[in-house]
Image (cartoon, rainbow, N blue to C red):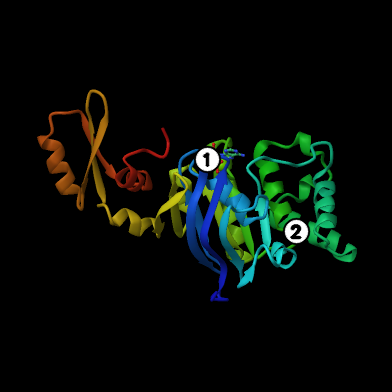
Amino acid sequence: MNDNNDILKVAGLKKHYKDKAAVTGLSFAFSSGEFVGLLGPNGAGKTTTIKMLTGLIRPSSGTIHYYGSDFQQESQKTKALIGVVPQQNNLDRDLTAYENLYLHAILYGIPKAARNARIDELLDFSGLADYRNRQVKTFSGGTMRRLVILRALLHEPKILFLDEPTVGLDPQIRRVIWDFIVKINRMKNTTILLTTHYIEEAERLCKRVLIINDGAIIVDGDPEALKDGIGHFVLELHKDESIEEEFFDTRPDALAALEKSTYPCKVRGVTLEDVFLKLTGRRINV
Ligand SMILES: Nc1ncnc2c1ncn2[C@@H]1O[C@H](COP(=O)(O)OP(=O)(O)O)[C@@H](O)[C@H]1O
Ligand SMILES: [Mg+2]
């Protein structure tokens, strides 16, 4: 039934909170080493999805398999495959980086003899060795974020889930985090699923994007291919009450339409926001 080459296979996954249908039926599979983005507006169901995939909440229905093993029935074995970076930073601020990591190593059953070597290897890998013995409360937001990500790698997971990993960070710090996540994917061959509502984050990082809206995946594919599907250039018409978009395959076609328009307007390249707009009539970021 399940293809064991798929690290993760999800079928008919749903979550209802009382009268609210947060996730209405997700089905997808990931191969080992993929870098996937779950992109959608606030309230789309991203965090709910991550929580179900990592065992923090139980699905209302549907199945989750890791390498063909049922997540609910074999949770001990499958949880060892998973690393989680939650949306909220839950480090102990009074402890040092090393102490936070050591506690996590105990929690995840890493043998005592292996703990220190694993911690120091990862501190080096992430460029945080200088922070080893400093209290977390003295760290910048970006450094805390890197530490949370590093901590999720301690038990050497095969798949890493990151929920909005760069929310609230400055643009240049965001790039540092991006580079770190890419390095994890490339050098450790860890499969990545990150959620985001930042178009640029999904476009720059992810080889595959699942766009989620109202609890359902509305499109799944390579960002470049998704953009190619609607045209390469957009003419934005700034009308009195709204901005309207027209799509063109070539820049000269878009510029010709711009010449004819009587509204203030501009021509730009297509983004995943346009893909979302075309499918839903709404914007991801409002
Ligand atoms: N514990 C909860 N109880 C009731 N409704 C919830 C709960 N958690 C999330 N929701 C609702 O489910 C929907 C999806 O939320 P969430 O998964 O957090 O979206 P996202 O992470 O994409 O912003 C939202 O409408 C949200 O208000
Ligand atoms: Mg969320």
Q: Secondary structure at mark 1?
A: strand
Q: Position of residue 259 (x, y in %)?
A: 12, 36
Q: Farthest residue toward the left? A: 260
Disc 1 C-beta below 8 A from ligand 1 = yes
The residue that mark 2 highlights is 154
- Residue 199 visible? The answer is yes
- Residue 205 visible? The answer is no
Residue at image position (53%, 53%) is 14
Q: Secondary structure at mark 2?
A: loop
Dividing the image into four quarters, tell me where ligand 2 lies.
Answer: top right
Residue at image position (80%, 46%) is 97
Residue closer to the observer: 104 or 6: 6
Quadrant where the C terminus is found in the figure: top left
Residue closer to the observer: 130 or 265: 265
Question: Is 53 on the left-hand or right-hand side of 208?
Answer: right
The residue that mark 1 highlights is 20
Residue at image position (67%, 47%) is 146
Question: Is 264 on the left-hand or right-hand side of 6?
Answer: left
Quadrant where the N terminus is found in the figure: bottom right
State the image quarter where residue 81 is shown. Answer: bottom right
Residue closer to the observer: 279 or 90: 279
Which amino acid, mark 1? Lys
Q: Position of residue 202 (x, y in %)?
A: 46, 50
Query: 10 Å neighbourhood of mark 2: few (<14), some, or many (≥20)?
Result: many
